[in-house]
Image (tube, rainbow, N blue to C red):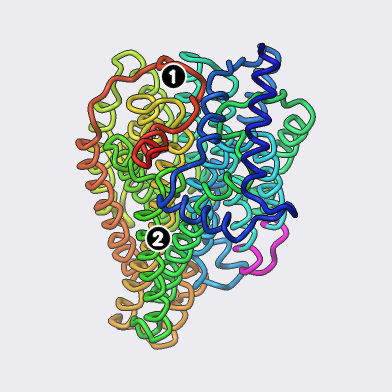
Amino acid sequence: MDTDKSNSTKDDSKSFTQRRTTPHGRPGIHGFIKSIRCMYGKEAYDEKLAQLWDAECREPFEYPNKGKRVVLLISAILPYMIGCLDHTIIATLIPTFIEKFDRPADIGWYASSYFLPFALLMPTLGKCYSLWKIKWLFLPSLIFLISGSMLCGLAQKSGVFIMARVLSGTGAAGILQGSLRILAFALPGAQRIYMEGMGAVMMGACIMSGPLIGGVIADTVGWEWAFWINIPPTVLSFVIVLFFFPTETPRTALFTLPTMEKIKRLDTLGSLCLMISLACLITVLQDYSYSLTLTIGPKDIGIAVVAGLALACFLVQEALVRPDFALIPRSMISRRSVWSSSLLLFFVFAGFTNFVFFMSIFQQVVQAETAADSAIHMLPYVISATVTAAITSLGATIIRLYNPFFITGGVLFSVGLGLISHMNENVVQVTKFGYEVLVGSGVGLMVMANISPCHTDLPEKDHAIANGVTGLGGALGASIAVPVSSALFNRAVRVGIMALDVPLSVKIIAAENITAINQTVPDEYREQIVDLLVSSIQVVFLFGVGCAIAAAITAFVVPWKSVTVPGSSGGQDGCLPSWSKRSQKIDGS
């Protein structure tokens, strides 16, 4: 009986593919037009394909045994930690890169080149992991991270380093999404909610520890090792996944779709438009931040227009395309739990990225600390963020609510960054440590927003896409924060230098590389330059304060819904996303 059913399912899949091709095996023009009409909701889905989905939906899912489960978790955790560390490991290395590459104009790109592909690929990869097997998506992601880390360590030019960071960011996006899907593949119910919470704690700990580890490595064995250390554990994970990853049974019926049907669901046009828009926006911000006249030229105006047009095209595409083909499904983003959590993560990551990168500059330039000392002095922030993230993970499973933690975190985050924005060169370490504890506690209490919609409001079949949407929010916040902060900083520095009563030669030296003033500016003028640097950093921190206040307000918008155990609604990942089923009813299929 089961064999007949399986054969029937395969025959249905084969017949569907054959009906969409010519006798020569190639798609006909009518099939292509029908496919396009189907993408934009002008034509109902094939009835046989709908039956194929229903047939696959009834097939049971079996979790791996304990031995295979351990292998799965090891293969997920190792690269997951590396990818999270790579987010901020360069924070304390920025002054080193400026000195080595002699390209201060690229300061914003050193971070944005990692965050931008990470942000843009999160929704697309979320869909990929719901359509294809984990193993053959996870392996290329590991290769990207290994290649990017190797090139970063070997880079002798700023451009090469930036391109290497793009590769690393691409790999990290696939690894983060893949690790979450491996947990869903390996662990049932309550075990998974615990491990997802621990994953969020691990993510917070690694991201917060990045500056610390990067600074210590740079001052001991050399900055190159901050990237080369990524390679051994990632290679180990690659070997484990390649040779020991258990055979995957279909987790969703979407696995059985023809390849072209899967590709259409990736919304290539929408992804391309969003990528062009954000890349152009960041380019304009970078050019503006280093413009000698502090104005936007015709070239940048043109790039800004392209950014606006690409964004408009993206919005039109998402409005017209069928929900199950959209990069960000309309009915998914319309859920308050999803968009509020994404917005909360946007402001949290924008605020803490602003803080981490410019606190490092404050400590190394204003307070003349080494990279290692600067990193060590970030420990209060790292420890407090890690501890409060663990408290949130445990507390949410006890009281069954995330909201009290989010609201408290928003208040602490705002107060901490507000106090930090008033620091000067005379601040004592104990006071600064107290401010860092406030900021770290706030971030740790809110970092669980990346998984809260999945635990409170969504069925399991929607988790991969929801993870992509919330991940996009956080990564976009980090991507935008770096160029905006750099633009504010460089504008404040250039305007302030013009008003200083110092020789023109000193102004030129300071303007060329403000982070090297301890080595380049004569002692008699250094105090004035340091005062200018402090006031400029304070302006930058005000942007972080604004993000923190916005996060605190957004925390009140997140709906108060009880945490539920994954799988309680029945089924592993389900069959079709709920919005896909609704769209079929609307179209009459």
For image coordinates 68% across by 34% down, the residue present is: 135
**Left or right: residue 534 compared with residue 284:** left
For image coordinates 45% across by 76% down, the residue present is: 522
Residue that badge 1 annotates: 566
> Tag 1 or tag 2, which sits nearer the N-term?
2
Q: Do the residues labelled 2 and 1 touch (CB within 8 Å)?
A: no
Residue 207 visible in the displayed image: yes
Percent x, y of residue 297: 38, 85
Q: Is residue 581 above or below residue 526?
A: above
* Quadrant of image for the C terminus: top left
* Quadrant of image for the N terminus: top right
Q: Is residue 210 above or below residue 222?
A: above
Percent x, y of residue 559: 23, 31
Tag 2 secondary structure: helix
Q: In this view, does 336 lie above or below 426?
A: above
For image coordinates 70% across by 36% down, the residue present is: 233
Whether residue 84 appears in magenta in the rendering, the answer is: no
Q: What stretch is highlighted in magenta?
A: 152-162
Residue that badge 2 annotates: 314
Q: Which amino acid does label 1 sit on?
A: Pro
**Left or right: residue 213 compared with residue 292:** right
Tag 1 secondary structure: loop
Mark number displayed over residue 280: none
In front of the other: 345 or 353 = 345
Q: Is residue 583 above or below residue 272?
A: above
Question: What secondary structure prevails in the magenta region?
Answer: helix
Residue 436 visible in the displayed image: no
Other-residue count near label 1 (Cα within 10 Å), few / some / many at <14 / 14–19 / ≥20: many
Real-space Cα separation, disc 2 to disc 1, in angstroms: 33 Å
